[in-house]
Image (cartoon, rainbow, N blue to C red):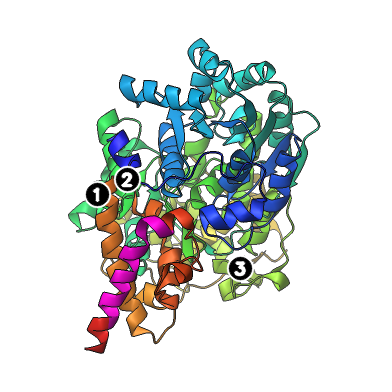
Amino acid sequence: MFDACYNNYVKINAHTFEGTDPELVLKTVFGYDSFRQNQRKIIQSVLNGKDTLAIMPTGGGKSICYQIPALIFEGITVVVSPLISLMQDQVDSLEASGIHSAFLNSSLTWDDYKKSVDEIKSGEVKIIYVSPEGLSTEKIRQILGSEGLKISCITIDEAHCVSQWGHDFRPDYMEIGSFRALFPDAVMIALTATATENVRQDIIKNLKLNKPQVFVSSFNRENIFLEVQPKRNALDQIVNCINKHYGESGIIYCYSRKAVDELTKVLSDMGFSVLNYHAGLPDNVRAENQDKFVKDKVQIIVATIAFGMGINKPNVRFVINYDLPKSLEEYYQEIGRAGRDGLASTALLLYSPGDINKVRFFFDSSSDPRKAEMRLQGMINFATACSCRRRILLGYFGEAYDPTKATKDCCCDICSCGEIPKVDMTIPVQKLICCIIRTQERFGSSYVIDVLLGSKQKRIIDNGHDRISTWGIGKELCKDDWFQLIDLCIAAGYLTKYGEYSILQITEDGYALLSSKEKVLLQFRRTTLAFPKKSSGERISTEKRIAEKPAADDHQAEEIIKALKAWRRRKADDMNVPPYVIFGDKTLYDIAAKKPGNRSSLLQVYGIGEAKADQFGKSIIAVIEDVMKEEND
C-alpha cells in the first residue's frame, strides 16, 4: 500500500528548488499566491541560519514555515513529530504536491523501512519525519549521521510538548537537545500553536535554542464562532448543533471514556453517522475509526482528548466540548481543529460548574497542582464570562483583541447578543439562598429550583418541602433562568457545590448577603426560548452551504462542487488517502467559481501547484465540462 499510493503521484526532483526564492516554491509547489501572517519572516529567519521559535494558531500554516526552507536548503530537514498519524498526514500532503518525503516509524514494514533509508541516503528525500522516541535511538541517529548526508534543519513540531507548563508534556522531547548537539551546523525551528510566556521560555531552554528569533502570530481564528451554553439538556444541545451543520464533519470532546461510549451509542441510535475514539479501545479499532473520520466516511467522532493532535482534516465545521477542558491551552488546541481551511465553523462549550470538581479530582496526580489550578481558573473565567469571549481567550495568550479591526460581524455568543448589562437580582438571589437554607443545604440545583417553582413531585412532598415558606415563591423566573442565576451566584462567591451530587452550599459571603442591605447586581439575561428539542435545529445541506461560497445564484457552481466532491471521494479511495490531501474544500470552491478550462487557468486556482495540475488537471476540467454540458442541454 505504501508504494502503490506514492507511486501514483507526479514527483518533482528533490533538488529542483535549492537556492530559489520562497515565493517561487510557494506558488509552484503549493499553489498559493501569498504568504500568511509571519510565514515569510519565519522562513527567512530559518534560511538565514537563525534558530527560530514560531507560535502560530492551528490552521495558521506552520508546516509551510519548514517545508519551504527544506526544499531550498541543500541538505535534508529532519522533522520531529509526536504522532504516527501526523507524520503520515504530512507525507501524504507533500507527496500529493510532488515532493518526495519519508517517515521512519513502527508503522512501516521492514521492506518499506529499508526502502526509505536507501532513498534518504541517496538524496532522493528532502524531508524526514521521526518521533522523539525514535530520534533518541542509536539506529536512527546512525542513519541520519551517514557519510555524505547533510542535515540542514531540525524542526520540532508541537514544541509545547517539551514544556511541563504545556498540556501535552512528553518527556521524550527532552532528549532532542542531545540530538541537536550531533549536528551543530543545522538550524533549528520549533513550532507550536499554543504557548504562553512560560511555555515559550521552557521551549527555548529545553531545546537549547541559540539566541532564537521568536515570532508570535495572532491567535485570533476569526472564522471560529465561540459559544458557551449552560449544560442543561446536553443531548438536545448537541443534536441542535449537529443539525445546524447537517452533513458536515464535527468532533465532540468528552472527559471520560464512559461518556464517549454512551454519547456515541445514543447519537448512533438516533441515526447520526458517528464513531468513538479513546485510549480504552483496541489499537486497530481506534485507528480504523480515526481513518474513517479523516476520510469523510463518518461524519462525527466522539472522543477524549486523546484524539486530535495528529488530525490535519481541514473541513471540520464544528467542535463541541461536552465537558470543561482543563485549561485554555487545551481548549484552544481542541477548537483549533475546526475550520482549518478558513471557512466558517463553530466551537460550542457546554458548561456546568460541576465539571470543575471533575477536573480538580485529577490534580493530585498532576506534576504541579498549583500550575493545574492556575490553568483551570483561566478556563473558568472564559466559560463564565459576561463580556467578549474572544478578548478573554486572546488575552490569556498575551494578545490584545481590537474588535474595530475584526472582519467578522460577531465573534462570540455574547457579542452576537450585545454585552450583558448588570441588573438588580437582589430579591431572586435572596429567595434562592433562603430556599437552600430551608432545604438544609442537602440538595442540588434541580431540586432547589423545583421547590422554588412549586413542583408537586413525590419526593418534594415526601420531604415536606411543599409546606416550607420558599415553596413556589420563584415563579417569576423559568427553570433555565434559575439555573443561570445559580451559576452567577457561584461565580460571585455566594454559593458553592460539593460532593458527587453537586450539593448547593452557602458561603460566608452568601450568608452575609441576607443581612446586608446592598443590592446584588449581576449580568443576568432572561431566557426567551427554551433549548431546542431533539429533532430541531435548522438543517442546511452541505451543498447549499457550498453553493453560497462561489456565488449565491450560481447554480452551475453548486453542481460543479457536487461533481468534484464525488470525483475527489473516488480518487481518494483509489489512492488510499484522505480527500483533503487531493484538494481541500476551499480549492473546490475556487474551481467552481473560476471554472478553469485549461492547465494555465488551473494554476490560478487556490491550492493548485504544478504537480497537482499535472496529476489531476485533465480530470478536473472533464468534470467541469460534463456539468456545464448537462446544464446547457
Q: CA distance from mark 2 to mark 3?
A: 68 Å
Report x, y in % for residue 397: 69, 48
Which residue, as the protein is rendered here, is positioned at the far right? 211
Q: Quadrant of residue 63?
A: top right
Of the pair 324 and 141, the residue shown nearer to us: 141
> Mark 2 or mark 1, which is nearer the start of the sequence?
2
Of the pair 123 and 401, the residue shown nearer to us: 123
User: In the image, which residues are magenta?
Assistant: 613-628
The nearer-to-camera label among 1 and 2 is: 2
Q: CA distance from mark 1 to mark 2?
A: 10 Å
Q: Quadrant of residue 586?
A: bottom left
Labelled disc at residue 574: 1
Of the pair 176 and 357, the residue shown nearer to us: 176
| Residue type, mark 3 in image | Met
Question: What residue is disc 3 on?
Answer: 425
Classified by dominant secondary structure, the portion drawn in magenta counts as helix
How many numbered discs?
Answer: 3
